[in-house]
Amino acid sequence: MNTVTDTRSATKPTSQSSVPRLAIWLIAAGAFGLELAVSGRYGYVRDELYFLAAGRHPAFGYVDQPALTPLIARISAAVTGNSLVGLRLVPALGLAALVVVTAAISRLLGAGRAGQVLAGLCAACCGEYIAAMHELTTTMPDFVLWAVVLLLVTRLLATQDPRWWVAIGIAAGIAGAAKWNIAFLAASLAVGFLTSDARRLLRSRYLIIGCGLAAIFTVPDLAWQAAHGWPNLAVFRALQVQAWHNRAVYWPAQVLFTGLALTPVWVCGLVWSLRNAQARPFRPAAIGCALAIAAQFVLGGKPYYSGGAYTFLLAAGCVPVERWLAARRPLAGRIRPATAAAAGLVGSAAVLLPVALPVLPAGVLRTVPLQKINYDLAESIGWPRQVALVAHEYHSLPLQLRRHTAVLAGNYGEAGAIDRYGAMYGLPEGYSGANTFWLWGPPPAADTAAIAVNVDPALLRREFTSVHLVAIFRNGLGVSDDEQGAQIFLATGLKSTWSRAWPAFRDYS
């Protein structure tokens, strides 16, 4: 009993008077400003175009994600005039939130002023976070809400007050409404609690209340999935095609995505959390983070899926790092080691910046293919140009044929681009078999022809009597991406009806 008492005393959170609020908020503001400064460069990524379209079709769920991100997209578009910069305000705020939350976790773990500042700076300089908070995708709320859950779990462990289960349940439930990924963290944390002294905290009515509140947020999506035949399972199967590739690059990506300067910090945080007596009360969170990261490797998940766990590990690492730096002599007799460490973090982020954000001219990607590391860089260029080309082919048709011609897209990025820019070019509503676009239905029954961009020509030939290649899309920059070289077809003479043909166009992936 005395050992437990001493350990709790050693991990007592830093007093409020020693919280460097100004420094942390300045770092958060700087992170927000950086994201906002480049938020209008290049263009939408394909997922953002999809979520904008999904936001105009409100539902409790969608084929490949729950409802929260499309809802954010809808509100952002309505409030900010449907602008690209406006859409990215919330993600930019997400990076600021990660800074504040990571610093708060470090304080609970016992970090002093310098450690808390370093923890906030780690979050601001993490390449994975900088890239993810640039755009509105499901990863953005997923990372932020993982961080919030870990903060609340750390608070629960620090105070031993089971009432924190209620807040944890709410945060986990909201995370579940953003991305199903939170289930891996919840299961991993459960193992952490069950295998440690903290298992006694599981015997609480507040945990049951928290689980009930989490269900309130997640059940609507589960009900939607059940009502539509569980289309998410088809998406999971499609993702498994890349499982072995994901495993092959997984561990190098953990180093690259966080950054060379940050990797020693989170590794130190993991070791300290699992082995140091002072960190013993927080071991369930450390175990949970380690298992969540390892689980994605075993399952073949994409390397960034477990990125939210690094908020806790970076915060934990700043506790021993702060003490180690405090014991070092000033460099050159006057530069504090903590200052030098902060400079190293900023330098590491600067090196990663061209990969994480569109800071370079888009044309550079032709000769320096940074999109091989960050896929979204190249996938955010050329969308208006592609829609303009589709519109050109559509308006080139004879009027009588045009009146009965639909616009088809092969993937949800192309369909979302037509939905976003089509009206500017006089295009009718676009249709696609990709994911939830398929559920929104086929073209009108009167349309017996189609201008089809990047649709499988073999599929078109099965469903139409005549199929001709009419154009090939080029982004004008010579940048290699998924849309460069996309073929545009004119298909005429629908052989059956759209209600009969539409099932063949479904593509859940």
Image (spheres, grey):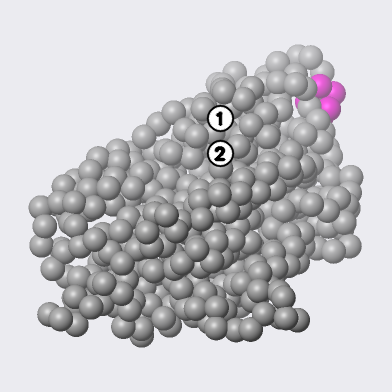
Q: In this view of the protein, which residue sits in the foreground, 69 or 322?
A: 322
Q: In the image, is 295 to the left or to the right of 365?
A: left
- Packing grade of label 1 (10 A; few <14, some 14-19, many >=20) is many
Q: Please tell me how crowded label 2 is: few (under 14), some (14-19), or many (20+) other residues with Cα within 10 Å.
A: many
Residue 348 on image: x %, y %: 70, 69
Q: Are marks 1 and 2 in contact (CB under 8 Å)?
A: yes
Q: Give the residues drawn in magenta, as a range.
A: 392-396
Residue 310 visible in the snapshot: no
Residue 394: in magenta span:
yes
Residue 492 figure quarter: top right
Residue that appears at 52% across and 29% down: 74
> Does the rendering let one see residue 30?
yes
Task: Give the residue number, with chain letter if any, for mark 1.
Answer: 76
Total marks in image:
2
The one nearer the camera, 501 or 299, is 299
Q: Secondary structure at mark 2?
A: helix
Q: Main secondary structure of the magenta part?
A: helix
- Expressed as whole percent of the image width and height from the top left, the position of residue 282 reads 31, 71
Is 133 rendered above or below residue 403?
Answer: below
Amino acid type of the residue tagged 1 in the rendering: Ser
Type of residue at label 2?
A: Val
Identify residue for label 2: 90
SS of the residue under disc 1: helix
